[in-house]
Image (cartoon, grey):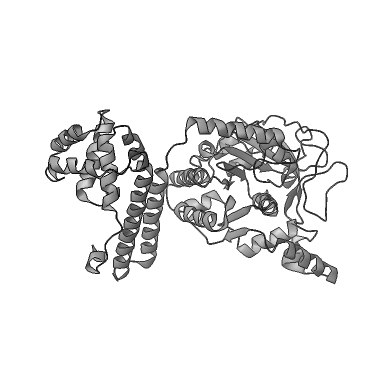
Amino acid sequence: MSDLKKGLIPPQAVDIEEAVLGAVLVDNASVIDLLHVIKTPDVFYKPAHQMVFEAIARLSNKNIPVDILSVSNELRAMKKLEEAGGDFYLINLTQKIASAAHIDYHAHILKQYYIKRKIIGLSSEAIRLAYDDAVDSLELMDLIDNDFVKLHEEVASGKTDVSWRETLQQVARNVEMLTNAGENDLIGIETGFTKLNKMFGGWKGGEFIVIGARPGMGKTAFVGSSMISAARAGHGVGFISLEMSAVQLATRAVALNSSLHLKQLTLNGFEHNKYFETLHRVTSEMFDYNIHIDDRPALNINEIKRKARLLHRKHGIKLLIVDYIQLSAGAGKDIRTETGKVTQGLKALAKELDIAVIGLAQLSREVEKTPTKRPALHHLKESGDIEQDADIVAFLYRAEYYGLNIDEELIGPGENSEFIVAKNRSGGLGTVGLWYDANRTKYMDYDPLSGMNENKFTNVHVDQPYVYPPVQPNENVDGSIF
């Protein structure tokens, strides 16, 4: 190893390795604790200890009790007994025990050293390749990124399970929180819409939400409302924008958070100074929002995961938005397979970081071949595993966009847009009515008593509970997402 040539000893703790293995050799019950934390022999630095651990793991897999005799026999069967130091070395390990009760703590120390050794190895290889003129620099960056993502996933996969008792206690705490919550209190993250807050209880950590629509329906406008509402409530938000620039998103945020029209902000400018006062007030209000936008194009799922972990660690984000899923899948590949990798990765990320992840999805042109142009789950069929991986699948639909009449049986008076909940693992399905303001590219609640709230971005509360009609997908149409 290059570090040894420099006089550096790789991170390790042989004395702790001896204590851990010795504890297992005299207390078979501690094997379970050890294997919960350590999954591979490479966590041990000393080769002899790697062999002993491998023998212990093999015995455990065969449900054979672990002690000096069984480990000795297993090493002999592996033809590694003498290489591991023989029976004398096994006996010597049992003299190095600190306490079997501390095995979990000691095992985690060994894992920390193992991770550091892996980082040193990956970094050394990256440096070696960086000096090679035959290696493309961009390909090297992808290689380094993939290697560290794999290491992170390996470390994450080693998390121990949660006890059944702890899980039930968490269920009880959740119910208690729901019981004690006020009418407008949320267990999850503010969605930006009163009716959706009531339907979902907010966007929840660990959930992967997919919102699909055809171009022009306002997918980005919808999640922009969620982004601003979550940030206003004090939550950190990460936005992976594969389509729009950060400035474009911020401009839309100003429009939806004020009475200013998008054309004023992007084309025409202001006719009166009072509009500059509004602009200054709105931008000042949003200046300290914990929002982080990455607008680099064509990020793959590994890059998105790396960015999300960084934002979670540094800024404590609770909501991640990806706009949109298919752009992350890349071009010129098996798009169905690649899209599936993206959705699986986003769902895993939601669970790993305990954050809500919203992924936007572009729908098939086949939607527009139906009489109503209303989207349904089968329009996601050729998009990998979007429907399977998502906890919630919803669609945005505006009949007026197609010059069609609004279905007043599905949405209320004054509403012009449908939020169609087609899949919901934790609740009901149905259609929620919203109002879309094209001038500000903004979705909002509609207050039947006072009309739209033009000058402020707030949730409007209705006196009567809203009834969610069942979703009515068109069963006769099938099609590709592309």
Q: Is residue 307 visible?
A: yes
- Residue situated in front as seen by the camera: 208 or 422: 208
Instruction: In the rendered view, tell whether residue 257 sits above or below residue 347.
Output: below
Q: Residue furthest right?
A: 449
Q: Please name the residue shown 59% across and 55% down the image.
A: 239
Q: Is residue 386 left or right of residue 420?
A: left
Q: Please name the residue shown 39% across and 48% down the image.
A: 155
Quarter residue 434 falls in: top right
Residue 81: percent from left, percent from top: 13, 41
Residue 294: percent from left, percent from top: 56, 60
Q: Is residue 65 left or right of residue 169?
A: left
Work out which quarter of the rendered image holds the N terminus and state it.
bottom left
Q: How many marks?
A: 0
Q: Please name the residue shown 58% across and 36% down the image.
A: 377
Residue 172: percent from left, percent from top: 60, 31
Quarter residue 368 falls in: top right
Instruction: In the rendered view, tell whether residue 297 sits above or below residue 394.
Output: below
- Residue situated in front as seen by the camera: 125 or 77: 77
- Residue situated in front as seen by the camera: 481 or 17: 17
Quarter residue 87 falls in: top left
Q: Is residue 371 visible?
A: no
Residue 109: percent from left, percent from top: 36, 50
- Residue situated in front as seen by the camera: 342 or 27: 27
Q: Is residue 162 left or right of residue 87?
A: right
